[in-house]
Image (cartoon, rainbow, N blue to C red):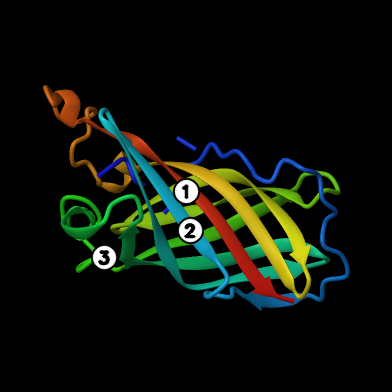
Amino acid sequence: MLTLISFLVGLFTLSLSPSVETPAPSNLEDGVYKVSLSDSQIKWQAYKVTGQHDGVVNLSSGELRIKDNKIAGGNFEVDMTSITVTDLSGESKGKLEGHLKSPDFFGVEDHPKAKFVISEAFPMGESGKYRIKGDLTIKDNTNPIAFNAQMTEEGEMLVANADLKIDRSKYNVRYGSGSFFDNLGDKTIYDEFDLAITLKVKK
């Protein structure tokens, strides 16, 4: 498929955007903040020997827990049935989307949700940057991941941005992987794929 998922680093050696320093959110009340599904987005990019593919996948639920003006936890579910390819059109687009949803890749009929649960969040100075640790579950396979995230404010919204790299092979997504199959040649699909995540929650 593309190494889509190498959700979601080996899952996450993550580099962060934006690079411009912005002030951290302040005066946040303790509590649980629900993610705005309509304002949030997850973009994916996967790679193969002969090129790459891009697309999006939707969140189905999510929340951030705030305590003492800092991220204290959170959990998020991704609707894997919503996988969409954005760099193709027509028959090619439909064919790839169907393949990504098949048991060769994410098997969305049996595994319609992926999930990430924050276990620890460490503030990195006063700029709204965090080191996030947690568990990612895809196809009933759970692995720890760690990545950087940036929290900012946009009007009445808290915004969290993160760029991740995920190793799909850790989640039993092995189709076309040179790590498990020999002599694939130019049909090889790389194990790692990128996710660019923007989460928005209402204050």
Q: Amino acid at mark 2?
A: Ile
> What is the secondary structure assignment of the residue under circle 1?
strand
Q: Amino acid at mark 3?
A: His
Question: Hey, which quadrant is residue 49 in on the image?
Answer: top left
Most foreground residue, 59 or 135: 59
> Compared to 10, does 80 lie above or below?
below
Q: Which residue is mark 1?
A: 195
Q: Which residue is mark 3?
A: 111
Q: Quadrant of the C terminus?
A: bottom right
| Marks 1,2: beta carbons within 8 A | yes
Q: Which x, y percent locates residue 118?
A: 57, 58
- Residue displayed at 49% across by 38% down: 9
Residues packed near mark 1 inside 10 Å, few (<14), some (14 to 19) or many (20 plus): many
Residue 42 badge: 2
Res 18 visible: yes
In the displayed structure image, the side of residue 122 where residue 165 appears, left or right: left
> Compared to 39, does 181 lie above or below?
above
> What is the secondary structure assignment of the residue under circle 2?
strand
- Residue displayed at 69% across by 46% down: 18
Q: Quadrant of the N terminus?
A: top left
